[in-house]
Image (cartoon, rainbow, N blue to C red):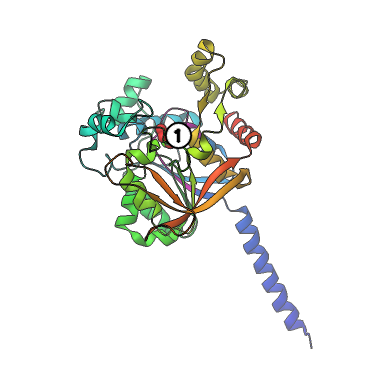
Amino acid sequence: MFTMKHFLVVLVRATLLLVVLVSVAGAKEKVILDTDMVVLYDDGVAMMMLANHPDIDLLGVTIVPGNTWLSEGTAYALRQLEVLNRTDIPVAIGISYPLRAARYETIQVEREMFGYNSSYTGCFARIEPASYLEVYRKEYRSAPKIKPVDKHAVNFLIDTIKANPGQVTVMPIGPCTNLAIAIRIAPEIIPLIKRVVYMGGAFDVPGNTTPAAEFNWWFDPEAAKMSVRAPFADQLIVGLDVCEKYHFNKKIFERITAVDTPIAKMFKRKYGPEFEKDPNYTRLVWDTIAAAVVIDPALIVEEETRWVDVNSDYGLDYGRSLGYRRQGPAGTQKARILLAIDEKRFWNLMVDLLTK
Ligand code: BDR
Ligand code: CA
């Protein structure tokens, strides 16, 4: 017989379930952005999109060398967070150099031996500045209002993931050096990470730095290999296969600069002269696609799951991404490789987040 007691038990359970469902639905997506930061495209814009979205809780920005040295990336991250009025978001400085010893010293010879697909070598093309303060003062003629946290990026990753088990999306949108060292020091964080969303790799298209390799994974192939081989619950790879399909152009620029905001001013300063020189100027926006699919997974139109790996043999294929449709080599894991997004929805999302 269904008594009042039964009724109350059912009521309490239903209420508890509702509370859980509501809190899960209302919970923000927790993200750590691991980045070789630049001003605006592409890492800077990716950070702006995440920081400006109401459903994203950007727990921190960890800095890795790649496009920029740590000192440069840190100065640019601090400055752009100041512009966004998001000085509450912690910035942590990471590992100084890629894992292979003497990479910087031998880079020119290496490029001659393995071939070029572009002349771009990121920070390797410049002398490393002494400090982020020096970079900031030189670029912005003032002192930063905020400073990086007093914790190494690797420890920041480990501690933040442990404090939020099963909830954090880690986004390496630069070389994977910080993540690789974090999972080596504390492998117990691997099952605690909700998912890893990389910008990196080139599976069925040529590399953009050497004929074999995409820049981020070329910069530190050993770290990329250690990362993609970790048994994370979910790995999504936003590589050149998808990124090279979408181009920023004058129309998007005009939509972003139609408002009078600090971001619009930055866009005008950086890209205005390009469009003046050539109205048909376009550029790729790599990392922003990774940010967009984290914010709005419904943007994904096509993806393929493969066992993935990165070649770390020091030779012509150094840094090449490998994707196996059947079982991959021992130790490889499955990952989702992004192949297409809803383009209109993507630009609308970006414009919306940059014009707030
Ligand atoms: C990737 O390399 C970096 O230069 C960009 O920021 C992007 O993450 C593209 O190959
Ligand atoms: Ca990047």
> Element at badge 1?
helix
Q: Quadrant of residue 88?
A: top left
Q: Quadrant of the C terminus?
A: top right
Residue furthest out toward the top: 277
Looking at the image, is 302 positioned above or below residue 86? below
296 magenta-colored: no
Residue 345 in the image, given as x and y percentages of width and height: 65, 36
Give the side of residue 326 with respect to residue 351, left or right: left
343 sits to left or right of 270: right
- The 10 Å Cα crowd at callout 1, few under 14, some 14 to 19, many 20 or more, is many
Q: Residue 89, position in %: x, y?
A: 45, 41
**Residue placed at 32% from the left, 23% from the top?**
137
When the figure is inspected, residue 257 is found, relative to residue 206, above or below; the finding is above
Percent from the top left, x then y, of residue 203? 46, 43
Residue at mark 1: C-beta within 8 A of ligand 2: yes
For the residue pair 245 and 4, the one nearer the viewer reads as 245
* Residue annotated with mark 1: 43
Residue 63 vertical position relative to residue 76 in the rendered view, above or below: below
Residue 25 visible (yes or no): yes
Q: Residue at x 38, y 55 (%)?
A: 229
Foreground of the two, 232 or 268: 232
Query: Which amino acid, mark 1?
Result: Asp
Residue 47 in sight: no
- Taking the image as four quarters, which one is ligand 1 found in? top left
- Residue stretch in magenta: 31-46
Tell whether position 42 is magenta: yes
Q: At x 65% / y 58%, what residue is drawn? A: 22
Total marks shown come to 1
Towards the viewer: 51 or 65: 65
Which residue is depicted at the point 41% across and 32% down? 208
